[in-house]
Image (tube, rainbow, N blue to C red):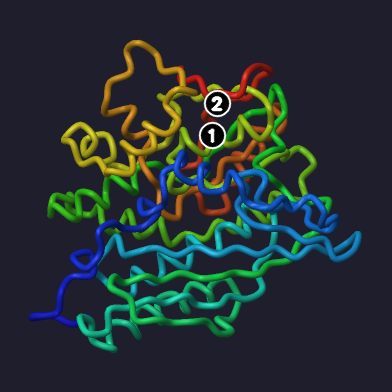
């Protein structure tokens, strides 16, 4: 990593990670008049719902999945930036129950401000995660941009009958979250030089942990729906599942797993702008308890970069699936709530 007069990556970006995403309300407005994809009978999953990837059915045994995800840096180490961005992009395929097969790089760099060696490290970081996932970076596209941008377009495969959407939750389902919450809070603390000792390694460990468990859970009939928790925060992505599935979701706030310093950082005010935008976009459809402090709400709206999977499953299978998820390398996985019949909103208990 270059030193001296070379600027920090985060200094070159006005935002970072999935906190760069447009607010949910803005996105809904932009997509409101887009052409319908319904005439394409083989398009199993398109833009009509807030799912993680598009899915095209080839035949009764094969479906192709496609997604793209990119953002500006939330960390200053270029290799770590590449690793986080790649892990985050590949997650969309796992969240649909698929297996990634290849990726294309998306790169925008202010080459007048960054040395080529720094950009190479970003690309190498992304390629290392793709190698871990067992896929090649088969090409890509690059431009000279005012801010550093990196991500991937990812192609995956799956069975049509094993596609797991965020619209599949059923009344009575248990909800499992596979990773801890707090990445946005850690990112905000990084920018202020206030991240506690050891917290950076914890954050990198979480954000570079592939969500491959999604593809492993998809064949299970007890697993009804999956989505990954990213820029809209736990409340936002839970609300998308509630709306898509036509039911209510109740989250038990004390059961939500947190990164080690998430609570203290939220209490100290290390909150991202995206957290405020998230609440402004969907807060009307969230029911919070009267004793919920502001810091706890900020945790629940905290934008996650390369966050965990939210899994809706039959309640009788929940404990067995949770044990399996933890054994697969997700130690913070927890059962955090349930789905019930009712209006499409999220209740926090």
Residue that extends furthest to the bottom in the rendered view of this protein: 116
Residue at point 18%, 65% (across, down): 11
Residue at point 72%, 31% (across, down): 314
The local secondary structure at tag 2 comes to strand
Residue that extends furthest to the top in the rendered view of this protein: 290
Along the line of sight, which residue is nearer the eye, 41 or 98? 41
| Residue corresponding to mark 2 | 337
Residue at point 80%, 41% (across, down): 221
Residue 312 image offset from top left, x and y in percent:
65, 35
Residue 57 image offset from top left, x and y in percent:
82, 61
Q: Quadrant of the N terminus?
A: bottom left
Q: Is residue 271 left or right of residue 20?
A: left
Which label number is shown at residue 279? Answer: none
Asked if marks 1 and 2 touch (Cβ < 8 Å), the reply is yes
The mark that comes first in sequence, 1 or 2, is: 1
Which label number is shown at residue 238? Answer: 1
């Amino acid at each position: 990593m270059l030193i001296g007069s070379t600027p920090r990556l985060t200094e070159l970006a006005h935002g970072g990670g999935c906190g760069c995403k447009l607010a949910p309300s803005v996105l809904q407005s932009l997509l409101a008049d887009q052409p319908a994809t319904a005439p394409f009978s083989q398009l199993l999953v398109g833009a009509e719902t807030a799912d993680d990837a598009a899915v095209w059915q080839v035949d009764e045994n094969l479906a192709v999945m496609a997604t793209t995800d990119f953002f500006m840096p939330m960390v200053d180490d270029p290799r770590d930036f590449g690793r986080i961005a790649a892990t985050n992009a590949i997650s969309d395929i796992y969240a649909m129950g698929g297996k990634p097969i290849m990726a294309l790089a998306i790169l925008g760099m202010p080459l007048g401000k960054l040395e080529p060696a720094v950009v190479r490290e970003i690309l190498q970081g992304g390629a290392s995660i793709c190698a871990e996932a067992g896929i090649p970076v088969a090409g890509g596209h690059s431009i000279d941009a005012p801010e550093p941008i990196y991500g991937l377009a990812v192609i995956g495969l799956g069975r049509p009958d094993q596609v797991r959407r965020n619209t599949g939750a059923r009344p009575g389902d248990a909800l499992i979250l596979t990773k801890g919450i707090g990445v946005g809070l850690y990112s905000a603390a990084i920018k202020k030089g206030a991240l506690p000792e050891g917290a950076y390694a914890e954050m990198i460990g979480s954000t570079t942990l592939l969500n491959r468990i999604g593809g492993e859970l998809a064949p299970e009939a007890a697993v009804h729906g999956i989505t990954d928790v990213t820029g809209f925060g736990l409340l936002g992505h839970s609300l998308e599942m509630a709306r898509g599935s036509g039911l209510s979701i109740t989250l038990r706030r004390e059961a939500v797993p947190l990164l080690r310093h998430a609570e203290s950082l939220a209490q100290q005010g290390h909150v991202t702008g995206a957290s405020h935008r998230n609440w402004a976009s969907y807060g009307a459809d969230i029911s919070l308890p009267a004793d919920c402090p502001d810091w706890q709400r900020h945790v629940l709206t905290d934008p996650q970069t390369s966050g965990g999977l939210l899994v809706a499953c039959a309640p009788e299978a929940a404990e067995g699936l949770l044990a399996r998820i933890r054994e697969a390398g997700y130690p913070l996985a927890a059962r955090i709530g349930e789905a019930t019949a009712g209006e499409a909103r999220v209740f926090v208990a």
